[in-house]
Image: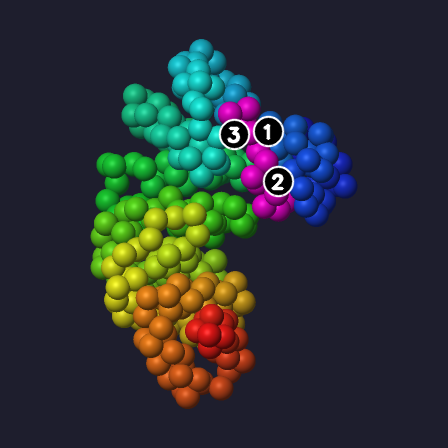
């Protein structure tokens, strides 16, 4: 029987605690055992990734073979989640390089399809950290994570490829022109969020802070997007750009308003200029 079927509905359909200390012990245990997805940001931040790594190694029957990886992570003093996730992904990537194609494929499938959103976050970073992959291969590989149903995986997905995007910005922007017309709002949002000049918990894209115009084809494609998830990303993108190019943002927003009377565009413009017009 699938382990998930043994979890009570009251846990599966919980809202999630507001504070880490309020997370029920049974929920914390299930999260750290990889048997449950986090319900909100509080739970996502509370996952003990080292404990989860031990649980996943046991689940995959890797035994003593993964011992060195576990010991290195246990000895690691880093506690910030945005450092721990790529560190674990790096360990998996190093482990994969010593395996044949079948073993690599099997492990990658296991991590990518894992019931734990935190484990899928590791899988996303494995793609982002793999120096053997081209930018095109990384973006193709990360796309399923960009469309993941869990918010945490979607956020980690763009962070995982942020560095490659910065290194080959023009190529990434060209690739994303196809993403912003995708039927999936998560894919459209990813293309915008991944290229935000400032972003959250990520390295800034200096070139777009200086000159945001190269990303204009992406922004134009979603200036009236029906999904609020995408609208928020577009307005945040422009809010970022407004910190260094306020006149460019204001001019663009005025043009959008003249060209479209849609409530979607109005919402984007209002949020995009929230800091510029309040001064």
Q: Is residue 66 visible?
A: no
Which stretch appears magenta? 39-52
Q: Main secondary structure of the magenta part?
A: helix
Q: Position of residue 169 (x, y in %)?
A: 25, 56
Q: Position of residue 208 (x, y in %)?
A: 28, 62
> The residue tagged with tag 3: helix, strand or loop?
helix
Q: Residue at x 39, y 63 (%)?
A: 240
Q: Is 45 covered by the magenta stretch?
A: yes
- Precedes in sequence: disc 2 or disc 3: 2
Q: Is 239 covered by the magenta stretch?
A: no
**Left or right position of 232 against 142:** right
Label 1 and label 2: CA atoms lie apart by 10 Å
**Residue 20 marker:** none
Label 1 and label 3: CA atoms lie apart by 7 Å
- Precedes in sequence: disc 1 or disc 3: 1
Closer-to-camera residue (249/128): 249
- Residue lying farthest bottom? 258
Q: Position of residue 213 (x, y in %)?
A: 27, 70
Q: Which quarter shows the N terminus?
A: top right
Closer-to-camera residue (276/88): 276
**Left or right position of 237 against 12:** left
Q: Residue at x 42, y 67 (%)?
A: 239
> The residue tagged with tag 2: helix, strand or loop?
helix
Label 2 and label 3: CA atoms lie apart by 12 Å
**Residue 43 marker:** 2
Residue behind mark 1: 32
Residue behind mark 3: 49
Residues at discs 2 and 3 in contact (Cβ within 8 Å): no
Q: Position of residue 58 (x, y in %)?
A: 53, 19
- Residue lying farthest front? 279
Residues at discs 1 and 3 in contact (Cβ within 8 Å): no
């Amino acid at each position: 029987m699938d382990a998930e079927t043994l979890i009570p509905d009251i846990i599966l359909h919980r809202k999630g605690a507001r504070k880490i200390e309020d997370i029920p012990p049974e929920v914390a245990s299930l999260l750290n055992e990889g048997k449950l997805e986090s319900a909100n940001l509080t739970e996502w931040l509370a996952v003990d990734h080292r404990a989860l790594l031990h649980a996943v190694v046991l689940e995959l029957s890797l035994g003593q073979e993964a011992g060195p990886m576990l010991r290195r992570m246990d000895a690691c003093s880093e506690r910030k989640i945005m450092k721990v996730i790529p560190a674990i992904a790096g360990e998996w990537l190093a482990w994969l390089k010593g395996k044949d194609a079948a073993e690599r494929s099997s492990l990658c499938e296991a991590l990518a399809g894992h019931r734990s959103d935190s484990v899928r976050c590791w899988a996303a970073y494995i793609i982002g950290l793999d120096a053997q992959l081209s930018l095109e291969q990384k973006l193709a590989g990360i796309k399923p994570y960009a469309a993941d149903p869990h918010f945490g995986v979607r956020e980690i997905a763009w962070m995982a490829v942020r560095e490659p995007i910065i290194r080959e910005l023009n190529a990434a922007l060209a690739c994303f022109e196809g993403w912003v017309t995708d039927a999936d709002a998560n894919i459209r949002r990813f293309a915008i969020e991944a290229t935000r000049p400032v972003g959250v918990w990520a390295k800034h894209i200096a070139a777009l802070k200086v000159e945001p115009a190269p990303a204009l084809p992406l922004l134009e494609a979603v200036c009236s997007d029906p999904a609020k998830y995408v609208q928020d990303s577009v307005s945040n993108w422009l809010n970022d750009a407004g910190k260094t190019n306020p006149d460019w943002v204001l001019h663009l927003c005025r043009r959008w308003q003249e060209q479209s009377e849609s409530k979607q565009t109005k919402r984007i413009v209002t949020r995009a200029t929230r800091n510029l017009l309040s001064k």
